Amino acid sequence: MAPIRDRNTGIWDEVSLSFTGPVKIVDPHLVSSFFDDYKRAYLHTTVELVNKSNLVADCTLNIQVGTEPEGDLILVEHLQTQKLSIPAGSHVQYTLPELFFYKPNLWWPNGMGKQSLYNVEITVDVEDHGESDSWSEHFGFRKVESDIDTTTGGRLFKVNGEPIFIRGGNWILSDGLLRLSKKRYKTDIKFHADMNFNMIRCWGGGLAERPEFYHYCDIYGLLVWQEFWITGDVDGRGVPVSNPDGPLDHDLFLLCARDTVKLLRNHPSLALWVGGNEQVPPDDINTALKNDLQLHPYFETNFESNSKEEISPILKDPSEYLDGTRIYVQGSMWDGFANGQGDFTDGPYEIQNPENFFKDDFYMYGFNPEVGSVGMPVAATIRATMPPEGWQIPLFNKLASGYVEEVANPIWVYHKYIPYSKPGLVHDQILLYGTPKDIDDFCLKAQLVNYIQYRALLEGWTSRMWTKYTGVLIWKTQNPWTGLRGQFYDHLHDQTAGFYGCRCAAEPIHVQLNLATYFIEVVNTTSKELSDVAIEASVWDLEGACPYYEVFDTLTIPSKTTLSTSEIKYPSSDNAKPVYFLLLKLYKKSDDTKKIISRNFYWLHLPGGDYKLLEPYKSNKIPLKIMSLTFIKGSSYEVKMHIQNTSSTNGDFVDIEKGQSWFRKILKNFSKKGSDVKVTEVGGAESGVAFFLHFSVHASVKDEKKGEDTRILPVHYSDNYFSLVPGEVMAVTLNFEAPEGITPRVMINGWNYEGGVTVSLA
């Protein structure tokens, strides 16, 4: 029986893969090679065939390659048939003739291009029996190269010949109790893509995830650093002391490693193999892995040839290798990672002053595989996952040095809470906003810090793209339990503000403020020059005035470059306010609509100051107008929101963004029966910035109890935790599934909107 494919996920039903005939297909290996600047490509295929019958099997081996299905249609580009006989009771390896493709659609990582995939189906028919077995998998034409960069000393990755600046994170495990599912994997990986990340490191303390994990990495363009299982449990450390000689059974370890390679090697997202976390495997395992995972000459960085014909006769087919297409690095701090020598030179793992990420002495090596910080979730998650004793916020003990030490409750300590202060180096970043009064206030201020912390981390690294750094992986992106450190979404799948700080900072094209120099920088990670663009910079004070406005125009930003442009001089001006907002917009000058390419909003204080003036600013009531369109398909909802700060501008500032045109286009294209526009208006007399707005989706509950968790999770937001200056508009799309029988509603909360605003979707 042929396997049945889920058209929604693209994943084949494992149960249907059982074969009924005498010959079974085992571990096909697919490899693509390229020539003539990626115009000519070849698909190499090797399969293992097992004949468990006591008769010779005369077979027809078929391979079909087609484009990804649209609906029920697949465009077949290649169909090849081979005749062969398999001796009784034998296990044979067979390499098919290569298939030629001219200018195939290439697979690219997130932010570099489309994740084009092909369907490859292999069947074996046995004479007098019919179809004996079938196998199918999607496949992406792409080439990953990696070497140590001579400028930075960091490991440099190239995909399809293009350098890629790595911005990603460390993955621990989907769920600590191994409640693994396609649905959760899809949400997890899409969250990483939503943050504009391009790599996930499967940490050696975890495991090789199920195939669905890698499938969604293929779909969403996340390169995978796959580590083998060498970490703190096999290095003689810990309590009780672990085995100092690595795994107890080296042969079993290698058997599992080779089987894992066969399981994962056809995924285009898989970028490299690494022997262990912060250490190398024992000598015998390390040597075996180096030999097993040696590169085919096609995939060595010094390999050059425009003609396949001149080298094919002397080379073994690359699909006959165990892998042969990806590098093997013996440990996470070796060979271009950290200091490259295996010393503990990753990290740090605690709160930082945001400007430090931009300074020359912050991190000295080209590629940091682990740098971590805080990760406090929202208050609703604390209440939903911990008893009332866990709702107690830390004590803030002031030390003789003037710094503050946080003393967390025992439940938070157990859940690995990272404080928002670092006595001697970093003043408490939450106290910069004033002393929190309860868990809600603490978690809200923590989100402000989360956003600033992680945006600064990525912007600091990207500020030195290719001149000092080749990449960074944040420790860590998620937790397999209710952890309170290093996460961008909690175990319930609610995002922190740090999620959106990363999303902002990791845009392929990005405008940013260097927090150490106060120069505006433009980041272009794409392969195309960015020309005829301008930057608009405006400063807004707490009274709603715009005391500083400047346009820097006619800029050209070369491909894969970070360009420093002009200094923001407002902080050194005579009338600078102690707390102010800065809005940066990068836009195309030749575009009549002046469409925004990148937008970045900062809240800042003067040197040596704090944000305590924001506390009374909460009482400023800023008017909003919210328009929404809701589209429902079964249990799936898509809500398109249009939010406008309707307060007047006090100054000469002119908003260049044509927000209304977006909504008119939506109305024109999506005005369908049952899709009514709903308008919600929030009154307010003050003019000013609508600060730190964030959405959440809830179930409509009668007689809702105070503190009851009514959230619907997960929700994919096109943006969240954003601010609007007077007159500005923002378009945000929400996608989620509502449980059966539940009517959802959208809540908008913000610094100026205590209690929130409800937008009904009914």
Image: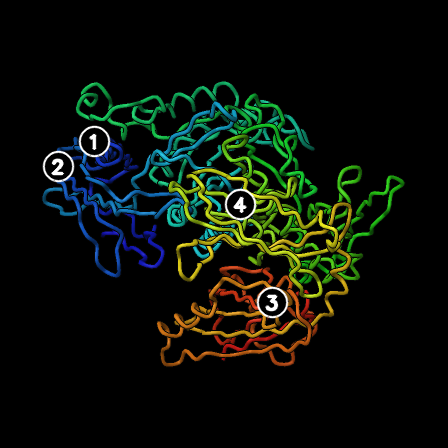
Disc on the earlier residue, 3 or 4: 4
Disc 2 residue type (three-letter): Gln
Left or right: residue 97 versus residue 660 is left
User: Residue drawn at (39%, 70%), measured in percent from left and top?
Assistant: 665
Task: Look at the numbered discs 4 and 1 and tell me whether their residues touch, using CB distance below 8 Å.
Answer: no
Kindly tell me whether residue 61 is visible in this rendering: yes
- Label 4 Cα neighbours within 10 Å, binned few <14 / some 14-19 / many ≥20: many
Which residue has dot 1 on it?
94
Which residue has dot 2 on it?
82
Q: Kindly indicate the quadrant of the structure image that contains residue 211.
A: top left
Q: For the residues marked 4 and 2, what is the alpha-carbon distance in whole angstroms?
A: 42 Å
Which residue has dot 4 on it?
173
Disc on the earlier residue, 4 or 1: 1
* Whole-percent x, y for residue 378 in the image: 65, 59
Task: Look at the numbered discs 3 and 1 and tell me whether their residues touch, using CB distance below 8 Å.
Answer: no
Q: For the residues marked 3 and 2, what is the alpha-carbon distance in whole angstroms?
A: 69 Å
